Image (cartoon, grey):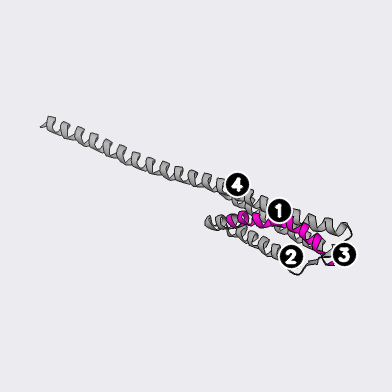
Amino acid sequence: MMEAIDVIDTAVKVGLGAMISGVSTYWVTKLNHASDREKDKSKRTHETLISITEKIERYLDCMTRCIARVDGIIKHGIPAGTIPDDILNEYRKVDSELVEARKERSSAYSRLRLIGEMEAANCVRELTKFESKFRNPILFDHQLPSQEELIALSVEFTAIREKAFKALNTAYNNA
């Protein structure tokens, strides 16, 4: 009878050991998988944010060149008010680059919304509104801003740009 109890005891111990080992392996694997998924998600988010930043930077560079071009026009003695056609045509060359860069801005906005970075997306939307505020009087009304108006626009642009980069930095650090 003792041999049967020893056999049963050994079988229970082996079975219990196997069960504990199996459950432990399952939980460790599950935790590792969750950790790996989180690391992959974080890596993809970082890569996406870097791509977004590059797109926004290209757009901002074009917007900066447009502002600089208007500043150059004003500094060359063209007074505020109606822009001569030849000067407007020169400005349109720089502006066409900005129009091309809208694709970059639009893509960045969509990606920011996709990854749930609404604060940064709202900054990009502010850039869109600023672009209209800056460009529309020049291109559609053919009106050149005064030096004071241009300074105010430049300050506004700089503030929006800094706010956008701060939001992107926060998103990157939190990803």
Q: Nearer the viewer, mark 2 or mark 1?
A: 2
Disc on res. 165: none
Taking depth in this image into account, of 120 and 170 the one nearest to the observer is 120
Give the secondary structure at mark 1. helix
Residue 87 on the magenta span: yes
How many angstroms separate mark 1 from mark 3 (CA)? 24 Å
Q: Classify residue 63 as left or right of residue 170.
A: right
| C-alpha separation, residue under disc 4 versus residue under disc 2 | 33 Å
Q: CA distance from mark 3 to mark 2?
A: 16 Å
Q: Are marks 4 and 2 in contact (CB under 8 Å)?
A: no
Q: Nearer the viewer, residue 87 or 35?
A: 87
Percent position (x, y) of residue 133? 72, 66
- Mark 2 or mark 1, earlier in chain: 1
Location of residue 72 (image quadrant): bottom right
Q: Amino acid at mark 1?
A: Cys
Using the rendered view, name the quadrant where residue 97 is placed.
bottom right
Q: Residues within 10 Å of mark 3 (few under 14, many from 20)?
A: some
Q: Which residue was labeled with disc 3?
A: 79
Q: Which mark is residue 50?
A: 4
Q: Earlier in the sequence, mark 1 or mark 3?
A: 1
Q: Secondary structure at mark 4?
A: helix
